[in-house]
Image: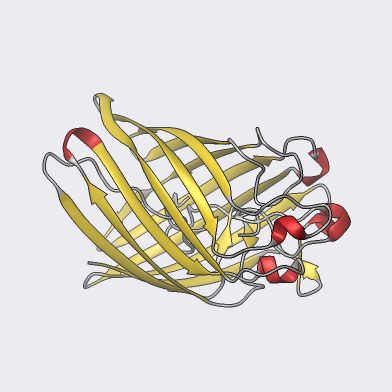
Amino acid sequence: MQIKFSGLNKTTQAKSLSLSECSLSALLVASCLCAAASALPTSASAEDKLSLTGNAAVVSDYRYRGITQTRFGPALQVGADLGLPNGLYAGVWATNIKWIKDAGAKGSSEVDLYGGYKTEIAKDVVADVGLLRYQYLGNTLGNVPGFDNANTTEIYGALTFGPVTAKYSHALTSLFGFKDSSGSGYFDLSASFDMGSGWTLVPHLGRQRVANNSTADYTDYSIAITKDVSGLLLGLSLIGVDAKDEMAYRADGKFAGKSAVVLSAKYNF
């Protein structure tokens, strides 16, 4: 993904970065957090017994960590989560993208594979640790001068205190095609407030650090509101990005993190 930088907790968490000299369109991540707005895959909840759930969503713009992954266009997203006994979970999530093609390479789909462990460590305090692999099927970004392979692996750790979650993701590989960017990190602070009658408010603040490329560092922020209508989660998110070098993130000739309203509809089954 461009650096996946998006939406509703995928955290879910979320993709592609472009190198400043190549002006890659939409390369980093928008957060998930936009609760319904985009789609960073969502982790399965810890269960005492085996559970399997699925989800499908349509979004007006796939944002990850604030950056568009679809050139400001819509995306169709599907996923599945497996909850295992004792807090273990695993999942898969997929979406269409456009940022790799914008970089002059092949690759139009993203598949995320993740797994981890979630447990309550104190009253109202939940810890979550795991591994997430962003796989861009058949991508050839590594063949483009100035880029590494788009496929990215991150480890993450999160603490949730009541409605508030703090999360840190650390890249074990180069980050979404950024050259020599292993060790990059993303810090994410978000909350989910139940407003009653099916309404939820989800504010988010994130900071992306790109190893060996500080000009590509940026901050993203969003506020989302969702409404549960008979199992269909409708969402509206306001998203913005503050970047040192907007030329490092381009999509359709525009700044890929420009402020926008994102609409979404998600169904869990």
Q: What's the residue at 80%, 38% (across, down)? A: 214
Residue 162 in the image: x percent, y percent?
32, 35
Q: Is residue 243 visible?
A: yes
Front residue of 249 and 24: 24
Position of the C terminus by quadrant: bottom left
Q: Find the residue positioned furthest to the top.
A: 122
Residue 109 in the image: x percent, y percent?
54, 68
Left or right, residue 173 beside residue 105: left
Color theme of the render: secondary structure
Q: What's the residue at 59%, 52% (across, down)? A: 151
Position of the N terminus by quadrant: bottom right
Q: What's the residue at 47%, 35% (across, down)? A: 156
Q: Is residue 82 above or below residue 237?
A: above
Left or right, residue 214 beside residue 54: right
Residue 177 in the image: x percent, y percent?
70, 51
Left or right, residue 245 beside residue 256: right
Q: Is residue 36 visible?
A: no
Q: Give the tally of numbered discs.
A: 0
Residue 204 in the image: x percent, y percent?
52, 48
